[in-house]
Image (cartoon, rainbow, N blue to C red):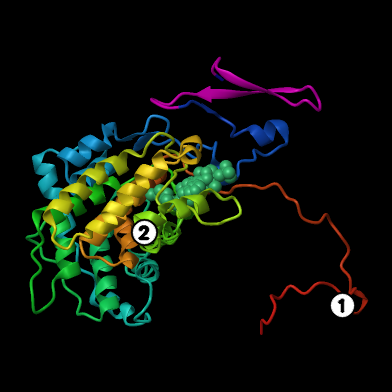
Amino acid sequence: MSNKTLTITDNRTGKTFDFEIKNGSCGPAVADLTTFYDKTGMFVYDPGFKSTASCSSGITFIDGEKGILLHRGYNIEDLAENSDYPEVCYLLLNGDLPDLQNKKKFIKILTHHTMLHEQILRFYSGFRRDSHPMAVMVGIVGALSSFYPEKTYDFSSEKGKWVAVSRLLAKMPTMAAMAYKYSLGQPFIYPKNELSYSENFLHMLFSTPSGEYKPSKASVAALDKLLILHADHEQNASTSTVKIAGSSGANPFACVAAGVASLWGPAHGGANESVIRMLNIIGDEKNISQFIKKAKDINDPFRLMGFGHRVYKSHDPRANVLRKYCHDLLNEVESFNAPLFKLATKLEEIALNDEYFIKKQLYPNVDFYSGIILKALGLPESMFTVIFAVARTVGWISQWKEMTESENRISRPRQLYNGKEIRQFIKINKRKKNESMFPEHIE
Ligand code: ACO
């Protein structure tokens, strides 16, 4: 053990226990508590993992106090300004930005695996036509695991991992666009190899057999930036879900389906959809104060969607970048919903100057602006989280890959049990009348 230790005293017995303090390259050190139970006979209690470093990782660094986000050491603002989404994918997966030759090769791979097996297309028709596209995505991504079975692909090998990585990255936009087309009742649009990743995605979303969609430069740039800004965010809920699923050795396509499910929730990726719904409900600047009041009322479940973050406590750097692209789109895209954007800006201004939000360190997060951009691109709210899922796939699969390449044990948390102590079984005819477990009027 190094001489840097954390000493914990159990006040009940006076015994002390030493735990090694480990330093990362940046950010807070960790106390290595892997032997905590063996030494103390106690578990560490941290519901919601507010103080838990679940792994060591070299992919993404966040300084929540200063509002810094780095991917493999590069600042997110720098990447958004100078890079493109495939390059950021390469960086997250590989650790370094690609040279020209490797970039070309990577793009060729991403481009040549975009099509889905025709049998997959039949899955779509099994869904109700009014299904939420995230429900469709959970099913379709999970179904891919049956097309990439372990008996054919050894996902513990470098080659097998690469199959999972490349196929997921290439096929996610196709699956997402098809979920959208299915909801509209329009024919699926197949990928086009000559287009860039973001152009091709827009093509599959908006072209029809009778008309080719020609996106504006601003639309392609906005989508590409949005994908970059959502690409990874260290050990967030959906990434941790993918990794926990993967820690048992499960099929990586099934693990990513679990990530899609986790992302869907309104406290995570579903927030971008909720932001637009909230702005529509607020409707007008004159109603903002009433909703701010509701958000502050502890007895009211209403929260300002797109505000607050578990980690960022000064600002979300991704929100700052997206805010700029919102403005660019406002100038270039005709269909841009300017009143909605103005309402969002006003709400942001009022909330940022409100004592409650200042005290609780609640700032707009990336989802506050991503919904507005996606709306400007012509997508319905139900597709917002799907776009997030497409972008985050690289984060999920990079973190999964890193986990499988390091010392990996099945993730198996423990608990503070607060149920009944051991008791005797009572035969049914001897049991007292007890409370029903069924909700009222249930059949
Ligand atoms: N509006 C009003 N009050 C809020 C908000 C909000 N958006 N967010 C947090 N608070 C309050 C809470 O009521 C709580 O108050 P209390 O101390 O009086 O109990 C306090 O601020 C701390 O909030 P917690 O929910 O305990 O913080 P936590 O870290 O668990 O949650 C979360 C973070 C889920 C993001 C939360 O801020 C939230 O629900 N925000 C709205 C949903 C949202 O925008 N989610 C997107 C997250 S970013 C992403 O996934 C890409």
Rendered location of residue 400, percent (x, y)? 39, 48
Decide: is 4 above or below 356: above
**What's the residue at 11%, 65% (across, down)?**
192
Q: Residues within 10 Å of mark 1 (few under 14, many from 20)?
A: few
Mark 1 lies on residue: 428
User: Could you say which quadrant of the image residue 184 lies in?
Assistant: bottom left
Disc 2 residue type (three-letter)? Leu
Disc 1 residue type (three-letter)? Ile
Q: Which residues are magenta?
A: 2-27
Rendered location of residue 105, percent (x, y)? 12, 49
Q: Earlier in the sequence, mark 1 or mark 2?
A: 2
Decide: is 15 above or below 228: above
**What's the residue at 54%, 17% (across, down)?**
2
Q: Is mark 1 within 8 Å of ligand 1?
A: no
Q: Which quadrant is home to the N terminus? A: top right
**What's the residue at 87%, 60% (across, down)?**
423
Disc 1/disc 2 C-alpha distance (Å): 55 Å
Mark 2 lies on residue: 279
Front residue (pair 407, 441)? 441
Q: Which mark is residue 23?
A: none
Q: Tell me the SS state at disc 1.
A: helix
Q: Would residue 119 be visible to someone looking at this image? A: no
User: Could you say which quadrant of the image residue 83 lies in?
Assistant: top left
322 in magenta: no
Rendered location of residue 340, percent (x, y)? 28, 58
Q: Which quadrant is home to the C terminus? A: bottom right
Decide: is 407 above or below 5: below
